[in-house]
């Protein structure tokens, strides 16, 4: 059965959510307009893709689509995901939406995730898990077991795995108790 990001992430209206490799933040803004978060932090190294003008335009678009105002504040960060400019244990949930396979040093990214995620926080990964070359970016996609082992290497446990759609899956991880 296909699930939505909110059904998998189950964040609260007080949660601080960080999306790594978010691009223009389109999907993230769509989600927090429909399901409020305390704060949405968008991180991408590409300043041409992630910028305030486009974010504001996206907010206006989704506010009209859903006839609903965005209440969650949004902060933008231009940085590499292997060097997140946030304090230790400052984020409730981290999203990697079709982005981890594009990152040059996934192990370093996971170390940063471990550093900034709160003790009871979670990570939601959306990926196509074929192990093939991604048509959009030309980089190798993960296979499911490879991705799970990567998170297990930093003592994160797979809590949930389900289909997003015909191609992609959601995997939700949290620290081992």
Image: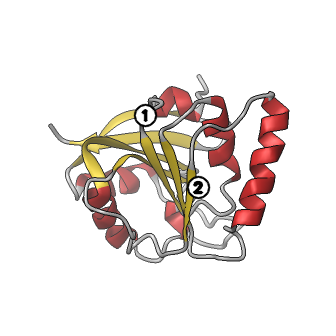
Q: Secondary structure at mark 2?
A: loop
The furthest residue to the left: 177
At 48% from the left and 59% from the top, the residue drawn is 142
- Total number of numbered labels? 2
- The answer to whether residue 74 is left or right of residue 10 is right
Tell me which colouring the rendered structure shows: secondary structure
User: Can you say which quadrant of the picture contains the C terminus?
Assistant: top left
Q: Secondary structure at mark 1?
A: loop
Q: Earlier in the sequence, mark 1 or mark 2?
A: 1
**Circle 2 residue:** 98
- The answer to whether residue 25 is left or right of residue 41 is right
User: Can you say which quadrant of the picture contains the N terminus?
Assistant: top right
Up-down relation of residue 125 to residue 66 (above or below): below
Place of residue 52 in the rendered image (x, y in percent of width and height, measured from the top left) = 70, 64
**Residue in the foreground of this view, choosing between 158 and 56:** 56
Q: Is residue 47 visible?
A: yes
**Residue in the foreground of this view, choosing between 32 and 142:** 32
**Circle 1 residue:** 14
At 59% from the left and 72% from the top, the residue drawn is 139
- Using the rendered view, name the quadrant where residue 70 is placed: top right
Place of residue 17 in the rendered image (x, y in percent of width and height, measured from the top left) = 46, 46
The residues tagged by marks 1 and 2 sit, at their Cα atoms, a distance apart of 25 Å
Q: Is residue 141 visible?
A: no
At 59% from the left and 59% from the top, the residue drawn is 22
Neighbour tally class for label 2: few under 14, some 14-19, many 20 plus, Cα within 10 Å = some
Place of residue 5 in the rendered image (x, y in percent of width and height, measured from the top left) = 56, 35
Up-down relation of residue 54 to residue 6 (above or below): below
- The answer to whether residue 175 is left or right of residue 173 is left
Neighbour tally class for label 1: few under 14, some 14-19, many 20 plus, Cα within 10 Å = few
- The answer to whether residue 177 is left or right of residue 162 is left
- Using the rendered view, name the quadrant where residue 29 is placed: top right
At 81% from the left and 28% from the top, the residue drawn is 67
């Amino acid at each position: 059965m296909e699930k939505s990001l909110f059904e998998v992430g189950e964040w609260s209206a007080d949660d601080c959510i960080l999306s790594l490799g978010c691009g223009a933040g389109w999907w993230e803004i769509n989600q927090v307009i429909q399901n409020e978060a305390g704060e949405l932090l968008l991180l991408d190294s590409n300043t041409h893709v992630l910028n305030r003008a486009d974010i504001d335009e996206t907010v206006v678009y989704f506010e009209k689509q859903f006839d609903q105002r965005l209440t969650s504040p949004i902060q933008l960060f231009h940085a590499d995901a292997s060097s997140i400019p946030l304090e230790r244990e400052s984020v409730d949930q981290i999203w990697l939406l079709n982005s981890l396979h594009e990152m040059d040093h996934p192990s370093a990214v996971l170390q940063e995730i471990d550093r900034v995620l709160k003790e009871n926080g979670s990570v939601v990964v959306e990926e196509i898990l074929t192990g093939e070359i991604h048509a959009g970016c030309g980089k190798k996609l993960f296979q499911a077991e490879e991705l799970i082992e990567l998170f297990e290497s930093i003592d994160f446990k797979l809590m949930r795995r389900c289909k997003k759609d015909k191609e992609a899956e959601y995997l939700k991880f949290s620290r081992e108790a």
